[in-house]
Amino acid sequence: MEYLSTHLMAIIETGGLFAPLIFISLHLLRPLLFLPVVFICITGGILFGTLAGTLYSLIGITLSSLIFYRMVQWMPKSIGKLVNLKHKLVGKNSNFTTPQIALLRLVPFIHFHLLSLCILEITTSFRDYMKFSLYSNIPLAVVYSSVGKWISTFSPLIIVSLLLILLPFLYVLRRKEISIKWEEFFDVNATKTGSLR
């Protein structure tokens, strides 16, 4: 990973005027290269500075969300696996709010497109999806581009402490309603076997 990061930084640094385009393209190729979003945002902050790195990362991440939306439209059966994974991890009836998703995007080991799927589930149109994606991507781009050097030098104890600080916010920002299907609430199979006795 260190060799790859050094090589990518050298390519972007020598890109000249095309360096921002190369960097944004790297965001789009990130899933194919198995690179974490956090790594690319930190690299943007180091190479371009806080303001430009945040802007380029925000553009790249938002375009990545757009490509994910188009992939869902083109391959709905393939996305079923991601939906099943989401149901196993967080449950069938749980929907996150946009502020919760924005906070979860700050956690490095949560899959970026799994959170994009959560946004897709709470929106009804392409415009809403892109708007909520942009809102949830802003904290990710700002935090990891601006303080990337410091975060990369944190000890595991500090990282765990920061994650524990985020947990109460996830609870406070949760959706205050739960929807349960009629069949699940009354458990049709249990009532049939109960009536036979």
Image (cartoon, helix red, strand yellow):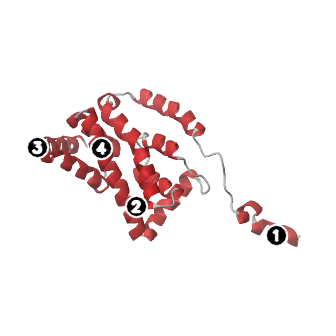
Separation of disc 3 and disc 4 at Cα? Answer: 18 Å
User: Which numbered disc, 3 or 2, marks the residue that appears first in the sequence?
Assistant: 3
- Residue 190 placed where, x, y %? 78, 66
The residues bearing labels 3 and 2 have C-alpha atoms spaced at a distance of 31 Å
Residue drawn at point x = 87 percent, y = 70 percent? 195
Assess disc 3: are there few (<14), some (14-19) or many (≥20) residues with their C-alpha within 10 Å of its C-alpha. few
The image shows residue 18 at horizontal and vertical percentages of 14, 48
> Residue 54 is drawn in which quadrant?
top left
Q: Quadrant of the C terminus?
A: bottom right
145 relative position to 112: left or right: left
Residue assigned mark 2: 69
Q: Amino acid at mark 1?
A: Thr
Labels 1 and 4: the sequence-earlier one: 4
Look at label 3 and name its amino acid.
Gly
Query: Residue 170 location, x and y as percent?
Result: 55, 39
Relative horizontal placement of residue 170, taking residue 30 as reference (left or right): right
Q: Nearer the viewer, residue 46 or 90?
A: 46
Query: Between tags 1 and 4, which lies in front?
Result: 4
